[in-house]
Amino acid sequence: MSTSQYKNVILTELEKLNDRIDLKILRGKSYHTEARRHKSLLTQLNHIEKIAKRVPASFFSFLL
């Protein structure tokens, strides 16, 4: 899986998770576990972006 595909998977998961969190807030339920997952996904996304900035895109061309 390329870094851009991995990034898209994380972004999609974050969107779904945000929707679940919003529903739980509206219903007055606890969203503690979702908040931890959200934080973890954001950490992964930041890590991917940091690596992508350091390493030129041509370096990843061998993955294709």
Image (cartoon, helix red, strand yellow):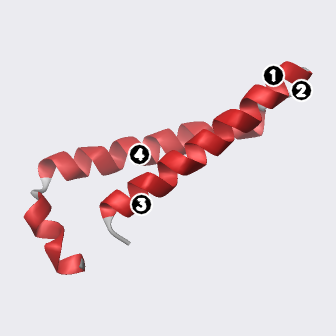
Q: The residue under label 3 is which amino acid type? A: Tyr
The C terminus lies in quadrant: bottom left
Q: Is residue 35 visible?
A: no
Say the numbered circle drawn on residue 45.
Answer: 4
Local secondary structure at mark 2:
loop
Could you tell me residue 60's position as x and y percent? 18, 69
Residue 29's disc is: 2
How many callouts does the rendering have?
4
Taking 21 as reference, is 43 left or right? left
Q: Secondary structure at mark 3?
A: helix
Rounded to the nearest whole Å, what is the CA distance between mark 3 and mark 2?
31 Å
Lower sequence index among marks 4 and 1: 1
- The N terminus lies in quadrant: bottom left
- Residue drawn at (24%, 78%) of the image: 63
Asked if marks 2 and 1 touch (Cβ < 8 Å), the reply is: yes
User: Circle 1 — which element?
Assistant: helix
CA separation in Å, label 4 and label 1: 24 Å
* Callout 4 crowding tier (Cα within 10 Å): few <14, some 14–19, many ≥20: some
Identity of the residue drawn at 13% across and 56% down: 55
Q: Residues within 10 Å of mark 2 (few under 14, many from 20)?
A: few
Disc with the residue nearer the chain's start (4 vs 3): 3
Mark positioned earlier in the residue sequence (4 or 2): 2
